[in-house]
Amino acid sequence: MVGIVIVSHSKMIADGTAELALQMAPSAPIRAAGGLPDGGIGTDFQRIYDAIEAVNGPDGVVVLFDMGSSMMTAEMAIETLADPNVRLGDGPLVEGAIVAAVSSIMDHSLEEILAVVRQAGEGHKF
Amino acid sequence: MITTAQAIRIIEEMASIIQQNKDYLTELDMPIGDSDHGINLARGFQAVTTKLPALADKDMGTILKTVGMTLVSTVGGASGPLYGTAFMRASMKVPGKAEVDMVDFMAMLEAAIDGVKIRGKSIPGEKTMLDAMVPAMEALRAAEGQSPAQMLAAAHAAAQVGVEKTKAMVATKGRASYLGERSIGHQDPGATSFTLLLGVVASAVQEG
């Protein structure tokens, strides 16, 4: 199964997003990496790196992020890992996490999951 | 021009100037960002100072790379990956060196600018640190042939002008971009902190 990492400036957003996705797909390999070690708002390189390592396997990992520095910090963690199967997902955090989790437990490939995450960001909500 | 021992003193001085300006940088970040620039950078540079004793006998590349990696790991905001990338890219221009001259410094700044552009997916004119970095680089090129102190003073002055110009810009990158037109009138915290750091280098070389 493709692993999923949720990166947010806020620990509560990351944890809550993972919680929501796990409700839909309880067996999905998903880790939240939100906030700073002291509980503050921000993105922590090591926390993201460790979360990726925790869910990385033969099928790879999709890393979802909220905005701004979470993308930059996630990119740096991915570059440091230098694993071509660890990729950033380009889509909305909450919807992206849910479609990624559901696709992961259906054993979809990394490329397929990246595509559904991108699709989740297309169009409008109503 | 700058030996590794001087570089370590310059980095200590950078940590100190960021600490002194922590509240000022955070105030600048308050109306247009997330009020954390000063706090984040101060935390990062504080962590950097704890690494410096172990770097005393290392080469310039290793020193700058360690600074960059430490900033990435400890800053927590956008300035972590941005300054981290800047120092790491600069380090790649001076591997194994015990001293850097103006040619090296220009190559380092150019590499740092390229790194920030790629990392932040940004170009000059978007109210970011690039709006101080790029004018500084242009001033260095224009002052080529002058003494290192004169070149760095020109670069620092150009960065200060660049900071002033960020006031009129609309932010399209980072948290400030959500404010759109309301970001006008405020100077960019990242351009400001870069100018403070460059000022440290300029003063150090001034003193000879």
Image: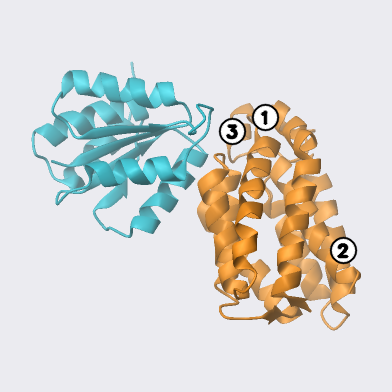
Q: The chain drawn cyan is chain what? A: A
Farthest-out residue, left: A106
Do tag 2 and tag 1 residues touch (Cβ < 8 Å)?
no
Mark sitting on residue B64: none
Reading the image, the residue beneath label 1 is B35
Mark nearer the N terminus (3 vs 1): 1
Please determine whether, in this image, residue B57 is positioned above or below residue B194.
below
Residue B202 against residue A52 in the figure, above or below: below
Q: Which amino acid, by three-letter code, is at mark 1?
A: Ser
Check if mark 3 and mark 1 are on a common chain. Answer: yes
Task: Please rate how many residues cluster around mark 1, counting C-alpha atoms within 10 Å: few if below 14, some from 14 to 19, many from 20.
Answer: some
SS type, badge 3 = helix
Task: Kindly identify the residue that appears in the image at 64 percent across and 60 percent down.
Answer: B52
Q: Is residue B93 left or right of residue A58?
A: right
Specify the label residue B203 is tagged with. Answer: 2
User: What residue is pinned by disc 3?
Assistant: B175
Q: Secondary structure at mark 1?
A: loop
In this rendering, does residue B128 appear at all?
yes
Asked whether the residues under marks 3 and 2 belong to the same chain, the reply is: yes
Kind of residue indicated by mark 3: Arg
Relative side of A91 to B204, left or right: left
Provide residue B25's location: percent of width, then percent of height. 75, 38
Dividing the picture into quarters, in which one does residue A21 lie? top left
The answer to whether residue B114 shows anywhere in this view is: no
Chain B in the picture: what colour? orange
Tell me if A46 is positioned left or right of B113 in this view.
Answer: left
Q: Is residue B140 left or right of residue B122?
A: right
CA gap, disc 3 and disc 2 = 32 Å
